Amino acid sequence: MWKRALLMLPLCVAGCGGGNEHKPEPSPAANQADVVDTVLKDRRRAIELRDRAAKLITDGDNTGAAELAEQAVKLAPDEPTVHDQLGFIYENLGRYDDAMESYARAGERFDGKDQRRVLSAAVGCALKLVAKYQQAGKLEEAEKAARRGIEISPDSYELTMQLGKVRFEGAIYDAAAEAFDAAANLTSGAAHYEALSWRGQSEFFGAEYEKAVATYTRLIDEGVTGYEAYGWRAYSNFKLNRLEDAENDFQVAAAKTTNPIKRGDYEEALKQLAEHK
C-alpha cells in the first residue's frame, strides 16, 4: 500500500501545481528595454504636443497652448524645449512667477547660448514681478521675487540693484546697502558707480555717516561725476559735526552740480553754516 502511495505522489504534485513552482522573471535587460521604449514614446508624444502648442501660440490661443505644454512637460520632464515653451506661454499670460520657474528648469537642462537666453528670460520675468508688487505696495513679495530671480541668475546686476531699491523703499537701509554693494561688485563703469552712489545714500539714511563719507570719498577719488558725491559727503560730514569739511564740500558741490534745485539746496546749506559760525 505504501509503495502505491509513493508512486502516486509525483502525479499529485504535478497535477496540483506543486505549491512552490518557480516562475521565471523577466531579465534586467528586458526591463530596461521596456523603460527606454516608454521614455522614447513619451518624448515623441511630448514633442508632438509642443508643436501643436506652437501652432496655438501663433493663433493667439495661449490658454490652449498652456494646456498642451503642461502635458508635454509631464511626459518629458528632461526635455528642455518643453520647459522653454511653457515659460514663454506663461509669460504671455502674465503668469511671471510660473514663467520664471519654467525658464529656470529649462536653464538647468540647456547649456551654452540657449541656457543664457532662458536665464535672461527668467530675469526679465523676475523684474516684471518685482515691479508689479512694488506698484501694489507689496514690498515683501517684491523682495521674495527679486531674491528668487537672483537664485536663478546670481550674476544679474539688474535684479540685485532692484533688490536694493525695494529694501531702500521699505527703509531697510542696512540690507539695501548690502544689495547695492553686491551690485557694484557685479559690474564696472557707470553701472558700478550708480550702485556705489545708491549704497552711499542707503548708508546716509541708515545713519551710517562714516560709511557714507567713505563711499562718497571713493567716488570723488575715482573722479566720478554726476552722482552728487560732494553734496552727499557734505551732508554726511554735517551730521558728524565736521562743519568745516561740510562747508568745503557744499562749496564744491554748488560749483559742480548741473541740477539747479540741488544747487539752491547747497547754497542754502552754506548760508546756514555761515550763520552757525
Image (cartoon, rainbow, N blue to C red):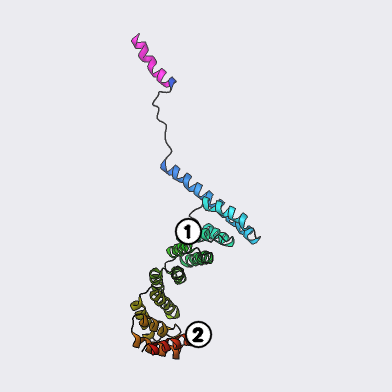
Tell me, yes or no, whether the highlighted magenta stretch contains residue 12.
yes
Where does the magenta region start and end? 1-14
Instruction: Assess whether residue 54 is covered by the magenta stretch.
Output: no
The residue identified by callout 2 is 261
Alpha-carbon span between mark 1 and mark 2: 49 Å
Seen in the picture, residue 269 relative to 71 is either above or below; the reply is: below
Residue occupying the point 35% across, 77% down: 209
What is the number of the mark on residue 105? Answer: 1
The structure residue drawn at horizontal position 37% and vertical position 11%, both measured from the top left corner, is 4
In which image quadrant can residue 221 be found? bottom left
Q: Which of 89/208 is in front? A: 208
Q: Quadrant of the C terminus?
A: bottom left
Disc 2 residue type (three-letter)? Ile
Tell me residue 257's x, y (percent): 46, 87
The residue type indicated by label 1 comes to: Arg
Return the residue nearer the eye: 8 or 178: 178
Q: Is residue 196 above or below residue 84?
A: below
